[in-house]
Image: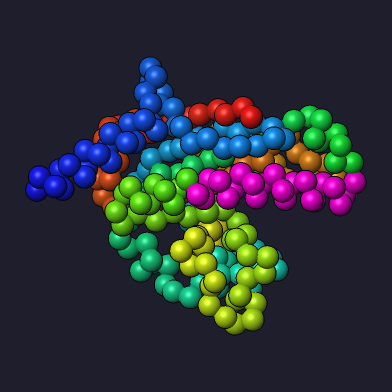
Amino acid sequence: MENGGRILWNRVSHFCHIFRREGIFMKLDLPIELEDGTVEIATKKMDFAAFCRLYQDRERFLPYCRECPNYGTVWSCPPLPFDSGEYFRPYREILVFCARITLNPLVIERADTPELVKKKGYEIVIRVKKQLEDHLRKMEEEFPHSHSLSSGGCNRCCRCARAKGDPCRKPAIMRYSLDAFGFDLTSIAKDLFGYDIEWCRDRLPAHFTLIHALLLPAGSLNFLGNQQDFSRKARM
C-alpha cells in the first residue's frame, strides 16, 4: 500500500503541473509547435457511457468511412479487427481533447492553388496531430490501463502495411481514430467546445479542429475534482 500510495501521489503531483487551476478554469500545459499559426487546446472530462450515448452512431457515420480510401487499407480505420463493445468495456471515463488551429492569414493567402491548399492543409494538420498523439501516449504511461484515440487515419507510415495484408509495423504508436468507432466529431466539437469544424474548399480555412481522447478506468481523474473545462493557448 505504501508503494502504491507513493506512485499515485507522484502521478497526481506530476499532473498538477499540467492541469493548473486559474479561477474557475484550469490550464492544460501541452505545448504544440506550429510555425503557421496558433494552437489552442481544450479538454472535457465526461462519463464514457454518457459520451457514447450522445455522440456514437455507427449506423449513421461508418458508411461514410466506406467512401474513404483509408477504408480497409489503414489499420486505424474501419473495418476494425475486433468488437468495439469489448474494446471499450474496461473504460468508465473519457478526457476529450480539442486542438483548435488558427492559421496565419499570410499562410492562407499564399496557398492560392488547389494543390497548395491540399499540401499545406495536410502538413499543418499532421504536424499538430502527431504532437498531440505523442502527448497522449505519455499520459497513457502515467495512468495505468488508459488508452488514447486519435483523429482521422494513422499517418505514422508512408503506406500502411494493411494495404498488402500485413500486420501494423508500429503497433506501439498506432492509435485508432474516434471516427473509426462511429463518433460524431462535428457534434463533439460544437457541443463540448463551441467550435464549428471548417473544411478546405478552394482556400485554406481560418481554423482546423482536431478531436482526440484518452479513455480511462473509473476514478482515474479524481484529483481534478468536478472541474471539467480546461484550456491552453500556445503561440509559436
Q: Position of residue 78 (x, y in %)?
A: 56, 69
- Looking at the image, which residue is at 49% across and 60% down? 173
Residue located farthest toward the top when viewing the structure as drawn:
23
- Looking at the image, which residue is at 70% across and 68% down? 69
Is residue 220 in sight in this rendering? yes
Q: Which of 196/30 is in front?
A: 30
Is residue 183 in sight in this rendering? no
- Looking at the image, which residue is at 61% across and 44% down? 128
Residue 190, image quadrant? top right
- Looking at the image, which residue is at 34% across and 36% down? 15
| Image label count | 0
Judge left or right: residue 14 versus residue 209.
left
Q: Position of residue 20 (x, y in %)?
A: 38, 26
Residue located farthest toward the bottom when viewing the structure as drawn:
165
Residue 32 highlighted magenta (yes or no): no
Q: Position of residue 65 (x, y in %)?
A: 63, 65
Q: Which of 227/54 is in front?
A: 227
Residue 68, image quadrant? bottom right
Q: Is residue 177 above or below residue 121?
A: below
Q: Position of residue 170 (x, y in %)?
A: 52, 67
Residue 119 highlighted magenta (yes or no): yes
Considering the image in quadrants, where does the C terminus appear? top right
Judge left or right: residue 142 versus residue 129.
left
Magenta portion: prevailing SS class: helix
Q: Which residues are magenta?
A: 113-134
What colour scheme has been applied to the protein in the rendered image?
rainbow
Q: Which of 234/7 is in front?
A: 7
Q: Is residue 116 above or below residue 20?
A: below
Q: Is residue 37 above or below residue 87?
A: above
Residue located farthest toward the right when viewing the structure as drawn:
113
